[in-house]
Amino acid sequence: MGLPEKGNLKKFGKIYEHFFKNRIQPIALLASLMDSDEDIKILDQRIKLSNEEKYLLVSIKKFENIFNEFENDKKAIEFLLKQFVLPKSIIDRPLKKTEAIELMKYLDRPELINTIENLKIPEFKINFKIISDLKIFDSDKQEW
């Protein structure tokens, strides 16, 4: 099926304990068996995950230790907010709010779900029409 041969059964058991209480998506439960992005790639090649499922697995693996990295929940949530807008690197895609909510369910932190749902993500209203109207990339204005 594409699951890792030596999946983390201890973590799987821990996540399964609150699977029904937190209404975790089944694909998120599989994240507990994965140890690396490579495991996710193998699973994807085997069962052809949707993009949404694959990105959810990657997000969970990437941020599953977030509360160990910060001294309090507020700083961890602030970090997640930054990931909605500006990921750590150019390669990373922005974190979606739905992925952060699933992450809280996965980590058995349901008390933080409302906080994440109420976060206001800043909008950067720029599109091709605005760029075109301002003639930012007008070839007549470019200096060579």
Image (spheres, rainbow, N blue to C red):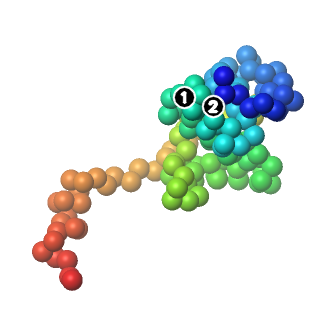
136 to 23, vertically: above or below: below
On-image quarter of the N terminus: top right
Tag 2: amino acid? Leu
x then y, percent, for residue 122: 46, 50
94 to 41, vertically: above or below: below
User: Given contact means CB atoms under 8 Å apart, are the residues at marks 1 and 2 in contact?
Assistant: yes
| Residue on which the image places disc 1 | 49
Along the line of sight, the residue nearer the viewer: 73 or 57: 57
Camera sees residue 81? yes
Along the line of sight, the residue nearer the viewer: 4 or 18: 4
- Residue ID at (53%, 40%): 96
Q: Which mark is residue 43?
A: 2
Mark 2 Cα-neighbour bin, 10 Å: few <14, some 14–19, many ≥20: some
x then y, percent, for residue 67: 77, 46
- Residue ID at (77%, 53%): 69
Q: Which mark is residue 90?
A: none
